[in-house]
């Protein structure tokens, strides 16, 4: 993939252009002779911005037609887990993205709380994404379904309700071991919070003087239990057995310790020699034991990151291997036929199923009491004939439909083209799923980050295969081939194009966005050429396309462009003349992002990527960074149809619904139905207009 970046001119140039712009604006009309068309001139009045009367739409409804809302799919490190037996919900804590997510009883995945921010945490109480965590290290559920979290680098204990409301139970942000109530208490290196049978919370803590156990009541009263472990290495995780004893993994010493109020800390299992030997407490060995959990019978289960195994320890101290073959992998299977990659946090449900945070695989695995290992999160559901709402998409980017009403999605992150039938079943239309550049039959072909797609009048599909720097053609018979892209004879453009959008005109011409060189290119039979470069007469003459993304063609052959980094929508007529439609910019031609409705220059967008057009010339825009869906009339009047500036995945009326970085958009001929590739959510959304 080409990494060249197009830059705006130096700010000093804007000063030089400013006087020219003011002078030009005083003229009644502007005349320009196009560089490549010396026989024609365009005479266009300067843009006028009268008051806007937005076109009326009596009803806008948004619904989800395919996918599971999964804005964090493929990015979650399931470091700590907690099972809420009341609601049958498994909670996942990821300290790297500073988020709390959940897998619901029906298997769907959802964000609960914490602003997604890789490796950069913060502190804030609030609801959902308005709350902030900082490298949290342990979660547990109470009987009411609340989650309590050890917010490690914030030195606080947090409470999260089932609705995602986050408050602080104890701690003040000071790194110190101090007993007290609420903000008067402090923690040092606290981690691995547990719920005792007495309704109080217990966690590990420690400082340079050694490790201790802390007790936190539901009212936030913090005390320190007697005894201090002063061994050469601290503990990693802790669990409480049904008898009330505490068991702790000593990762660096490859051992398991036990704590009781009567005897304090004592070695329970492990010879201290790194290994994988099963056997008695004194002869067995472990390899970087990390997560630990207890079942109702008092058996312990331990995840080992050095050996990629899950071990079982009886109350008598006998150690066996429950699952894993010792090799790094992600295979499901029974016992030693399964494999893991850096297993960490563990949780258990009332049926004694063990849940494993398989960190480096970014998966959650389930182990039955019989040792059967399956993957319940992190493995894309990309098979065939999957019910639409059970399918998973990974960065769905482009979307189109065939004459029968079936939808097709460029599933960029999975390197697939997916089909959603009118009956609501999702299947693979083309692609093996492997990243590559192979032609052949539809299922044997390989793509690399496909982003746009469209059909021609005879049923051939064209795909903008961004990562492969190609357009791909898929015939109605299911054969995939590659198409070369534009290279200028003088070397001024190409060979890198990185096409992101593609559209076919009524005469069969193929238009695509040349994302690297900022052009719209056209393929007319054997000829490939530049069709438009973005400049047009008027105030913004001289402003060329910058990373144009989406492209559409109307029934008359006019081309519409989402000029992403100029925050504007452009129209190119059949003669190749660029016509400004909407989007704001300064007098110095500097693009101005925003979210204002209005006419022409008074409207604004924020990195719009998707554009579609209906039979009468209305345009529909996926205003990506605003999380909005916009409509533009042929006269250039911009209104907001659906979405809010805050990202989300809520269905409902246009004013209520939310999106997360929508990218692709398709409109039917009458403009009554839109389909949106809601990229950040991993969803396909439908908008019904009345």
Image: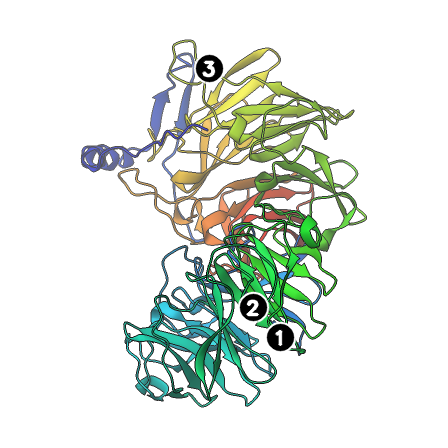
Question: Where does label 3 land, which residue?
Answer: 487
Q: Is residue 497 left or right of residue 676?
A: left
Relative placement, left or right, of 283 versus 547 is right
Alpha carbon distance from label 1 to label 2: 8 Å
Q: Secondary structure at mark 1?
A: loop
Of the two numbered discs 3 and 2 in the rendering, the one whose residue sits closer to the viewer: 2
Marks 1 and 3, the one that precedes in the sequence = 1
Please state which of residues 672 and 91 is positioned toward the viewer in this rendering: 91
Q: Residue 442 at x, y = what percent?
A: 72, 28
- Circle 1/circle 2 CB separation < 8 Å: yes
Q: Position of residue 444 (x, y in %)?
A: 70, 27
Q: How many marks?
A: 3
Residue beneath the point at 26% across and 32% down: 9
Q: Quadrant of residue 541?
A: top left
Badge 3 element: loop
Local packing at callout 2 (Cα closer than 10 Å; few below 14, some 14-19, many 20+) is many
Quick one: 370 or 272, which is closer to the camera?
272
Q: Name the residue beneath numbered marker 1.
A: 316
Query: Where 307 sits versus 384, above or below?
Result: below
Q: Where is residue 56 drawn, in percent x and y?
A: 59, 56
Q: Is residue 434 above or below residue 149?
A: above
Residue receiving disc 2? 281
| Quarter of the view holding residue 377 | bottom right
Residue at 41% over, 14% down: 36
Is 89 situated left or right of 27 in this image?
right
Q: Secondary structure at mark 2?
A: loop
Q: Residues within 10 Å of mark 3 (few under 14, many from 20)?
A: some
Q: CA distance from mark 3 to mark 2?
A: 70 Å
């Amino acid at each position: 993939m080409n990494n060249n970046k197009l830059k705006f001119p130096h700010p000093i140039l804007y000063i030089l252009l400013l006087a020219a712009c003011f002078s030009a604006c005083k003229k009644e009309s502007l005349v320009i002779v196009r560089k490549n068309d010396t026989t024609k001139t365009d005479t266009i009045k300067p843009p006028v911005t009268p008051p806007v009367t937005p076109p009326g739409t009596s009803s806008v409804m948004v619904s989800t037609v395919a996918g599971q809302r999964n804005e964090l799919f493929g990015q979650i490190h399931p470091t700590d887990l907690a099972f809420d037996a009341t609601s049958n919900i498994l909670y996942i804590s990821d300290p790297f993205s500073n988020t709390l997510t959940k897998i619901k009883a029906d298997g769907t995945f959802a964000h609960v709380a914490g602003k997604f921010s890789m490796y950069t945490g913060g502190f804030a109480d609030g609801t959902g994404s308005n709350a902030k965590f900082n490298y949290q290290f342990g979660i547990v559920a109470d009987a009411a379904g609340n989650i309590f979290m050890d917010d490690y680098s914030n030195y606080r204990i947090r409470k999260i309700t089932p609705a995602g409301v986050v408050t602080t139970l104890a701690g003040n942000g000071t790194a110190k071991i101090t007993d007290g109530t609420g903000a008067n208490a402090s923690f040092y290196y606290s981690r691995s919070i547990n719920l005792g049978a007495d309704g109080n919370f217990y966690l590990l803590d420690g400082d340079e003087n050694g490790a201790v156990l802390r007790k936190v009541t539901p009212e936030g009263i913090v005390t320190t239990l007697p005894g201090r472990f002063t061994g050469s290495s601290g503990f990693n995780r802790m669990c409480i057995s049904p008898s009330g004893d505490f068991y702790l993994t000593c990762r660096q010493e490859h051992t398991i310790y036990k704590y009781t109020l009567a005897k304090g800390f004592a070695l329970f299992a492990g010879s201290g020699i790194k290994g994988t030997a099963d056997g008695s407490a004194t002869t067995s060995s472990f390899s970087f034991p990390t997560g630990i959990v207890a079942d109702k019978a008092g058996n312990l289960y331990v995840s080992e990151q050095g050996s990629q195994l899950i071990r079982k320890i009886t109350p008598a101290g006998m150690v066996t291997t429950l699952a894993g073959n010792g090799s790094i992998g992600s295979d499901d299977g029974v016992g030693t036929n399964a494999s893991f990659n850096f297993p960490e946090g563990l949780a258990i449900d009332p049926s004694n199923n063990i849940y494993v945070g398989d960190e480096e695989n970014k998966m959650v695995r389930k182990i039955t009491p019989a040792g059967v290992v399956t993957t319940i999160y992190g493995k894309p559901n990309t098979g065939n004939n999957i019910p639409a709402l059970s399918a998973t998409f990974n960065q769905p980017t482009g979307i189109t439909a065939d004459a029968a009403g079936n939808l097709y999605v460029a599933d960029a992150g999975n390197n697939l083209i997916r089909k959603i039938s009118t009956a609501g079943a999702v299947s693979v239309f083309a692609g093996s799923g492997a990243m590559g550049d192979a032609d052949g039959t539809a299922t044997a072909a390989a793509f690399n980050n496909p982003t746009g797609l469209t059909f021609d009048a005879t049923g051939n599909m064209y795909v903008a295969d961004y990562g492969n720097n190609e357009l791909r053609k898929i015939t109605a018979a299911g054969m995939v081939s590659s198409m070369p892209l534009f290279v200028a004879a003088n070397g001024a453009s190409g060979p890198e194009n990185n096409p992101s959008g593609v559209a076919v005109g009524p005469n069969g011409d193929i238009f695509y966005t040349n994302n690297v060189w900022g052009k719209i290119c056209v393929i007319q039979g054997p000829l490939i050429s530049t069709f438009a470069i973005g400049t047009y007469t008027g105030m913004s003459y001289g402003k060329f396309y910058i990373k144009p993304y989406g492209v559409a063609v109307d029934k008359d052959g006019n081309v519409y462009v989402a000029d992403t980094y100029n925050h504007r929508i452009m129209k190119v007529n059949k003669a190749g003349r660029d016509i400004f439609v909407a989007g704001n910019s300064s007098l110095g031609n500097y693009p101005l992002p925003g979210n204002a409705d209005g006419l022409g220059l008074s409207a604004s967008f924020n990195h719009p990527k998707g554009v579609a057009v209906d039979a009468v010339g209305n345009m529909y825009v996926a205003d990506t960074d605003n999380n909005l869906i916009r409509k533009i009339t042929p006269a250039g009047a911009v209104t907001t149809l659906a979405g809010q500036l805050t990202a989300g995945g809520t269905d409902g009326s246009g004013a209520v619904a939310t999106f997360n970085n929508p990218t692709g958009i398709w409109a039917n001929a009458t403009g009554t139905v839109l389909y949106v590739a809601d990229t950040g959510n991993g969803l396909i959304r439908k908008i019904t207009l009345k």
